[in-house]
Image (cartoon, grey):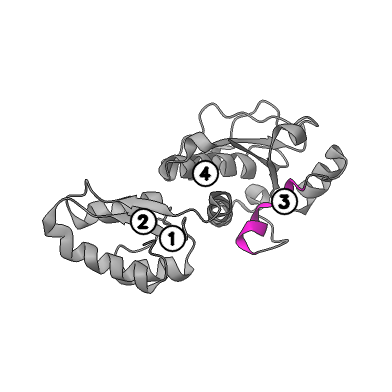
């Protein structure tokens, strides 16, 4: 099991959103049992408080509950207890390095480092109220982290129980962690595979049992193959 800890200043906005988003991603991809995911604060200002209401509403709008999540401060022992410790900004990184006395095991990272954005901070909504930007940054960072932890293993897309084309897209939306704004058509699928944030690098496709979907499935396979993402 891989243990992941997200850190921000108060543990009521960015880090609990990251924790809960990644838990939801792990569930959707069938990997929930492979991770232990938590979050904490660098300060003691919000100890015991629930997730900040606008953050709760943003999560809830995507079907993610924050019930039962309360702020805690990170501890020196967390360095030994977790495999990855991920900050939201440079101030978080500074406090973690100070608290832990450095990073001898290379566990501490900025979350967006995994998305090829070294040094870029997760948008802080505390002063701006812009929780959509925070959500967008966390989606990008957590998907990139999921891909890094998956270590290139093929992702299985099982369409066997699908009864229509929308069912097929629903499987891909869940397993590939599509952004809710992505369109459901083959052109969009090609764009997602070749350049937009999603989970998985190579895919095993299990065909639908419904033979009326065979032609569409073959077209789908062609898109994956042309994008170099089909695991034979």
Residue 194 in picture, x, y percent from top left: 45, 70
Please say if 122 is above or below 191: above
**Residue at the (76%, 38%) spot, across then down:** 42
3 vs 1, front mark: 1
The residue stretch that appears in magenta: 106-116
Q: Is residue 188 visible?
A: no
Q: Name the side, left or right, on which 87 lies relative to 178.
A: right
| Residue tagged 3 | 109
2 vs 4, front mark: 2
Few, some or many residues within 10 Å of mark 4 (<14, 14–19, 20+): many
CB-based contact (under 8 Å), mark 2 and mark 4: no
Considering the image in quadrants, where does the C terminus appear? bottom left
Residue 85 falls inside the magenta stretch: no
Mark 2 or 4, nearer chain start: 4
Q: Secondary structure at mark 4?
A: helix
Q: Could you give the CA–CA distance between mark 2 and mark 4, rounded to whole angstroms?
A: 25 Å
| Residue tagged 1 | 202
CB-based contact (under 8 Å), mark 2 and mark 1: yes
Question: Farthest residue in the left direction?
Answer: 212
**Residue at the (70%, 38%) spot, across then down:** 10
Residue nearest the viewer, comparing 139 with 229: 229
Q: Secondary structure at mark 1?
A: loop
Mark 4 or 3, nearer chain start: 4
Residue nearest the viewer, comparing 46 with 73: 73
CB-based contact (under 8 Å), mark 3 and mark 1: no
| Residue tagged 2 | 204
Q: Could you give the CA–CA distance between mark 2 and mark 1, rounded to whole angstroms?
A: 7 Å
Please say if 83 is above or below 206: above
Q: Secondary structure at mark 2?
A: strand
């Amino acid at each position: 099991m891989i243990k992941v800890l997200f850190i921000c200043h108060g543990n009521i906005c960015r880090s609990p959103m990251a924790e809960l988003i990644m838990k939801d991603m792990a569930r959707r991809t069938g990997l929930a049992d492979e991770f232990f995911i938590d979050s904490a604060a660098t300060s003691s200002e919000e100890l015991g408080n629930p997730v900040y209401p606008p953050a709760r509403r943003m999560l809830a709008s995507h079907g993610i509950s924050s019930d039962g999540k309360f702020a805690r401060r990170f501890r020196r022992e967390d360095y030994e207890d977790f495999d990855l410790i991920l900050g939201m900004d440079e101030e978080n990184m500074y406090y973690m390095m100070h608290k832990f006395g450095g990073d001898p095991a290379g566990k501490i990272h900025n979350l967006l480092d995994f998305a090829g954005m070294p040094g870029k901070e997760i948008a802080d909504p505390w002063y701006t109220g812009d929780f959509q930007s925070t959500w967008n940054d966390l989606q990008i960072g957590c998907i990139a982290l999921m891909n890094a932890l998956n270590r290139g293993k093929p992702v299985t897309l099982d369409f066997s129980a699908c009864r229509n084309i929308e069912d097929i897209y629903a499987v891909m939306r869940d397993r590939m962690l599509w952004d809710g704004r992505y369109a459901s058509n083959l052109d969009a699928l090609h764009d997602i595979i070749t350049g937009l944030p999603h989970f998985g690098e190579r895919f095993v496709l299990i065909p639908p049992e419904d033979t009326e979907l065979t032609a569409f499935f073959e077209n789908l396979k062609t898109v994956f193959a042309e994008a170099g993402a089909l695991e034979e």
